[in-house]
Amino acid sequence: MDAYDEGSNARHGPDAPRRPAPPAQRSAPADSAAPDVSPGPELAPDVSPGPELAPDVSPGPELAPVVAPAPPGSWPPGEPRTGIAALSPRYQVGVALALAVVAIGVCVHIGMTFLHVAPANTVTRAHGEAVDDWIYPEFEQNWKLFAPNPLQQNISIQVRAGVRGPDGMTQTTGWYDLSAEDGRAIDGNLLPSHTQQNELRRAWDFFVATHDSENRPVGLRGSLSESYLRRIMVLRLGRDDAVRAATGSSGVIERVQVRSRTSNVPPPEWSREKVSTTPSYRELPWWRVPQDEARGGVR
């Protein structure tokens, strides 16, 4: 290794000159006097503000804040009340009573419907009339779809009216097939109304079930079925364009007559069954229309 290598671990020989010491390590001569420095005004050190350093805090275990329990019945501050809680106590009582009435009504209806479709039992024998009054005619249950021998007839309801014109003369219209009108409204309609599907059919079934073969009412429900069917006829005729055109839109319906047209459904081609397709008619007597119904009072 070279003797003049200046590395920190270099070894120097005895004849090698010594390296001069750095100025900081040189000692001042003993006889040199320290400079005479007179004390002056003390100056504050010029320290420029630097970035503030965050204290060095070692992370410790996180402690959950202690929250005092809210008194019962209080609402959290800053959160608006919604729903029934936003109402005053008086209105809250009103809403509670309304909900109770609705719940009672639903329970009563479900119970009446169950008793109507259930087999004869002690309750129906004692309160059968009350159950029938609740169910008929709006909530009547019909199970013909699941009967062993379903209905195989086409029944259409037709009506004609006696209309009194402005001159005082009564004019009789032709027969209007209301069932055919409902059928045209349902055909191709993905969401047909309940009125178009069932109102006319159920009204006729109600009439037939409460009248004998001579069209005489049986019991009080017979008179009710006549009024129900007659009002439907008047409403349908009152909004029929053909009737308004025949009477000049100024006539008044005085009486109506209803009939049914029944024809058997033809059997399929592969069947050997032979049935008559000749239609049969059941014609009811003329019904006089009260003035309030003729003027639209039942709407």
Image: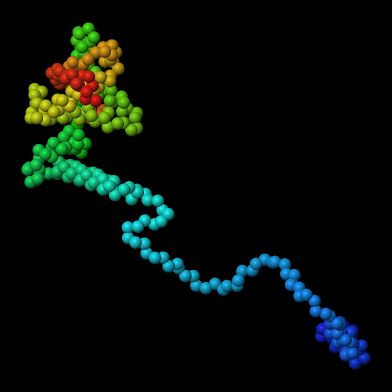
The quarter of the displayed image where residue 235 is located: top left
The quarter of the displayed image where residue 203 is located: top left
Where residue 277 appears, as percent x and y from the top left, is: 20, 22
Q: Quadrant of the C terminus?
A: top left
The residue located at (18%, 44%) in the rendering is 108
Where residue 78 appears, as percent x and y from the top left, is: 42, 54
Vertical placement of 154 versus 29: above or below?
above
The residue located at (33%, 50%) in the rendering is 85
The one of 39 and 92 positioned closer to us in this rendering: 39
Q: Is residue 103 visible?
A: no
The quarter of the displayed image where residue 195 is located: top left
Farthest residue toward the bottom? 14
Numbered marks: total: 0
The residue located at (15%, 18%) in the rendering is 288
Looking at the picture, the colour scheme in use is rainbow
Where residue 71 appears, as percent x and y from the top left, is: 34, 61
Q: Quadrant of the N terminus?
A: bottom right
The residue located at (84%, 80%) in the rendering is 37
Relative to 117, 96 lies left or right: right
The one of 65 and 175 positioned closer to us in this rendering: 65
Relative to 32, 122 lies left or right: left
Vertical placement of 52 versus 169: above or below?
below
Q: Is residue 187 visible?
A: yes
Where residue 281 appears, as percent x and y from the top left, is: 16, 20
